[in-house]
Image: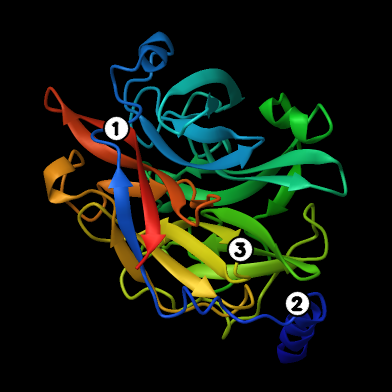
Amino acid sequence: MKNSLFKVIFAVAAGMSIFFASAQNAGKVLKTITEYKGPVISSTHPDVVASNNKSGFETGQVVKLNGMYHMFINEMFDRPHRDLRIAYWTSADAVNWKRQSTIVHSIPGRTHTNPRSEVWVNAVVFNDDENAWNIFYTAYRAGDSTKGEIHGNDYEGRIWRAKSVITGKDGIAGPYADMDIVLQPDEHSQSWEGQQAVASFFPYKAGNTWFAIYDGHNHLPRTGWPDGMAFAQKLNGPWTRMPEGFNPLTIVKEFGENAIVSRLKDGRYMMLFDSFGDQEIGYSLSNDGVHWDKEVRVKVQSKEKIWAEPGDHFTRTPLCAIEEDDGTFTVVYTAMMLVNGKRFYAVGKCVLGWQ
């Protein structure tokens, strides 16, 4: 197993030019520079009302293509974190959003025999080998109470890959067709992954190798949501887990979930994820896309503009950190607010910069 790991790291090094982190940004941390006052998509947004989205949004990714922001996001159309569909929205400024379509539906009926009662979008990546966009999403079944499982919890996450039917980058809007399952519980599952794994999956390329950050979680006994890594020579797989000892990663002390990874202009890699802290998200940096620094947290709402409720799980999941031409980062994220005493998970936006 150690030899396999060395081969992976060698493959990364062989495909990368030697670089040094930008001296201008080295040693600096990300801070919020500007923020939109209030959510950019709330419960009163016309498209939220028209689509009968009752509970809001959670997980996904925003990509920028030809000056347009494209958001693939989960809509919790009825019960929060239970009734889900994957939707596609667009915006010219990451503030004014328009809902375009539903990309993936879940199968109604949350039971232990329904493996797609929930669908959680993780990543949207262009696959050069197929000349098509790929969407990766997690599908779960409910627990089987007759076997001692918790009925209301998620079990046996499977990572589905769907491909855009229209080829080329202009096919980002879809439609998308399911291709295969790229990672799931099997004989190669690791002890830390637990009963919920595979809980999320975000692929990115470093050198000649594709890597992915994926989550695990155990319900009984209850654990955190540790991260691991897998690798592949092609985006569509086959995917192999990094060995235990490397997995799970030791980036966070308390909690990290639903990571997204981007390559920075200075050559480094940045991982952004849901973390603990009031109105906070977490990030980690890497020089090679394999070895990651300890978590740093950043507040995305200032005292004067707070709209998300306080609490470790109420500012939820960052959907992007898009590095703009001026060196700042556009961040879109989900967070919970109270609307007439009821929880609604809205979408917010801020701009981060190095300080």
Mark 2 nearby-residue class (10 Å; few <14, some 14–19, many ≥20): many
Q: Which residue is mark 1?
A: 39
Instruction: Determine whether 282 is above or below 166 in the image.
Output: below
Q: Is residue 189 visible?
A: no
Element at label 1: loop
Element at label 2: helix
Amino acid at the residue labelled 2: Val
- First in sequence, mark 1 or 3: give its number: 1
Q: Is residue 160 visible?
A: yes
Could you say which is closer to the camera, residue 290 or residue 265? 265
**Cβ–Cβ under 8 Å for marks 2 and 1:** no
Q: Residue at x 59, y 78 (%)?
A: 287
Alpha carbons under labels 3 and 2: distance apart: 18 Å
Instruction: Determine whether 259 is above or below 169 in the image.
Output: below
Numbered disc total: 3
Amino acid at the residue labelled 3: Lys
Residue 144 coordinates in the image, percent (x, y): 45, 45
Residue 283 coordinates in the image, percent (x, y): 42, 65
Amino acid at the residue labelled 1: Pro
How has the structure been colored for display?
A: rainbow
Alpha carbons under labels 2 and 1: distance apart: 40 Å
Residue 27 coordinates in the image, percent (x, y): 41, 80
- First in sequence, mark 2 or 1: give its number: 2
Q: Quadrant of the N terminus?
A: bottom right
Q: Quadrant of residue 224?
A: bottom left
Return the residue found at the far top.
50
Q: Which residue is mark 2?
A: 12
